[in-house]
Image: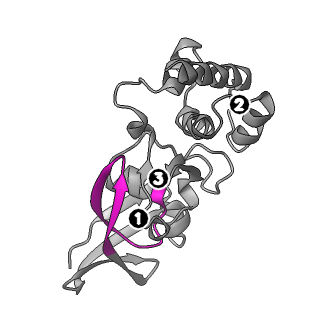
């Protein structure tokens, strides 16, 4: 039996809730010759090779079907731009695009992804040339920066649908994204600027 200790998100004390916050997973490669399994709180959970399209590339990941997309991106694929905030889809730090729509990856199981393309902050543009990224830099939006990848992903989804958003559109689209530093005025201004850049492109 091969045991690999994987602490997901540093929440070793919540091993009974692996699909929500992670936990300590002990890998068991002898439980079945064709599947990986994980021993979580005394029970075996089998992992499968699941195909997903992330940032334009189709990859296979070894993951339990109910593992949140957030942990697949961060812990399995090493895409750490998407942040863990609350684990309950309340803060928006983990926002990614799924089929072009903003979703909270901490509460989206990998099994729900299917054939829909996933776009993370790393896939928005390789050189920070996306209008939202340009506007964020131009207006010096971030303070601590922790929530900003989620803010940018929500903002870019809005601009893709509303090339000229009103303040009300922005408030509605960004309502699920919390900034503890209170940069909301700069975020709003940057979204207007990004929309302007998009229209000029």
Location of residue 172 in the rendering, given as x and y in whole percent from the top left corner: 76, 41
Cα–Cα gap, marks 2 and 1: 30 Å
Q: Quadrant of residue 155?
A: top right
Q: What range of the chain is rendered magenta?
A: 48-70
Location of residue 61 in the rendering, given as x and y in whole percent from the top left corner: 30, 63
* Residue 58 magenta-highlighted: yes
- Judged from the image, the secondary structure of the residue bearing numbered disc 1 is loop
- Judged from the image, the secondary structure of the residue bearing numbered disc 3 is loop
Mark found first going from the N terminus, 2 or 1: 1
Question: Is residue 8 among what the camera can see?
Answer: no
Q: Is residue 180 above or below residue 21?
A: above
Q: Given this view, does label 3 or label 2 mark the residue nearer the observer?
A: 2
Q: Nearer the viewer, residue 67 or 56?
A: 56
Residue where numbered disc 3 is placed: 9
Mark found first going from the N terminus, 1 or 3: 3
Residue where numbered disc 2 is placed: 165
Q: Nearer the viewer, residue 120 or 71?
A: 120
Cα–Cα gap, marks 3 and 2: 36 Å
Q: Nearer the viewer, residue 94 or 23?
A: 94
Q: Quadrant of residue 79?
A: top left
Total residue callouts:
3
Task: Classify 10 Å Cα crowding around label 1: few (below 14), some (14-19), many (20 and above).
Answer: few
Location of residue 151 in the rendering, given as x and y in whole percent from the top left corner: 60, 35
Q: Quadrant of residue 3?
A: bottom left
Mark found first going from the N terminus, 3 or 2: 3
Q: Could you tell whether 4 is left or right of 140 in the image?
A: left
Cα–Cα gap, marks 1 and 3: 26 Å
Residue where numbered disc 1 is placed: 115
Labelled pair 2, 1 in contact (Cβ < 8 Å): no
Task: Classify 10 Å Cα crowding around label 3: few (below 14), some (14-19), many (20 and above).
Answer: some
Question: Is residue 196 among what the camera can see?
Answer: yes
Q: Nearer the viewer, residue 22 or 199?
A: 199
């Amino acid at each position: 039996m091969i045991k690999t200790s994987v602490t997901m998100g540093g929440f070793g004390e919540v091993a009974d809730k692996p699909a929500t916050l992670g936990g300590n997973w002990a890998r068991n490669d002898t439980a079945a010759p064709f599947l990986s399994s994980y021993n979580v709180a005394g029970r075996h959970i089998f992992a499968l090779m699941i195909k997903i399209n992330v940032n334009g590339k189709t990859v296979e990941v070894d993951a339990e079907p109910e593992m949140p997309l957030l942990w697949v991106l961060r812990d399995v694929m090493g895409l750490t731009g998407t942040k863990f905030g609350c684990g309950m889809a309340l803060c928006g730090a983990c926002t990614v695009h799924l089929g072009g729509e903003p979703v909270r990856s901490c509460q989206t199981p990998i099994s729900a992804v299917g054939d829909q393309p996933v776009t993370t902050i790393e896939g928005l543009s390789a050189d920070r040339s996306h209008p939202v990224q340009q506007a964020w830099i131009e207006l010096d939006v971030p303070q601590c920066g922790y929530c900003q990848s989620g803010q940018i992903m929500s903002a870019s989804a809005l601009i893709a649908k509303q090339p000229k958003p009103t303040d009300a559109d922005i408030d509605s689209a960004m309502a699920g994204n919390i900034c503890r530093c209170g940069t909301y005025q700069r975020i709003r201004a940057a979204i207007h600027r990004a929309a302007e850049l998009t229209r000029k492109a």
